[in-house]
Image (cartoon, rainbow, N blue to C red):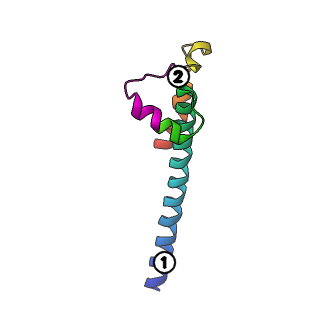
Amino acid sequence: RQIHRHESRLRRSGEKARIELEQIQTLRKEVEDSLMDAYGVKTVEQLHEAIRKNPQFVPAKKSQQNVPTNAPPALSQPLAKRAA
């Protein structure tokens, strides 16, 4: 019985870890995509190369040009929910 309890506990924590990993991978992809847009490159490899060549480069934030200034709180809300 005790072995079974340990197995189900491990299964639950494994499931949690898998879900967290998926969320992290999704966030990473979103960040990479927006950086690739900002740097004007098509692949992650090109992005790494561009960052290596010019670490001081600050990408222009395209989205902020057309978005009203009260938009960022709405954008940061999903992150706050994930952290909670």
Total count of labels: 2
Q: Position of residue 41 (x, y in %)?
A: 57, 32
- In this rendering, the answer to whether 1 lies above or below 80 is below
Q: Magenta segment, which residues?
A: 49-61
What residue did someone put label 2 on? 72
Q: Could you tell me the amino acid type at mark 2?
A: Pro
Examine the residues drawn in magenta and state their main secondary structure: loop
| Residue at image point 47% right, 71% down | 9
Look at the numbered disc 1 and give the secondary structure of its residue. helix
What residue did someone put label 1 on? 7
- In this rendering, the answer to whether 54 lies above or below 25 is above
Q: Position of residue 19 (x, y in %)?
A: 54, 56
Q: CA distance from mark 2 to mark 1?
A: 43 Å
Q: Is residue 7 left or right of residue 71?
A: left
Q: Could you tell me the amino acid type at mark 1?
A: Glu
User: In terms of image quadrants, where is residue 71?
Assistant: top right
Q: Give 26 or 83, whichever is nearer the viewer.
A: 26
| Residue at image point 53% right, 41% down | 44
**Chain-order first, disc 2 or disc 1:** 1
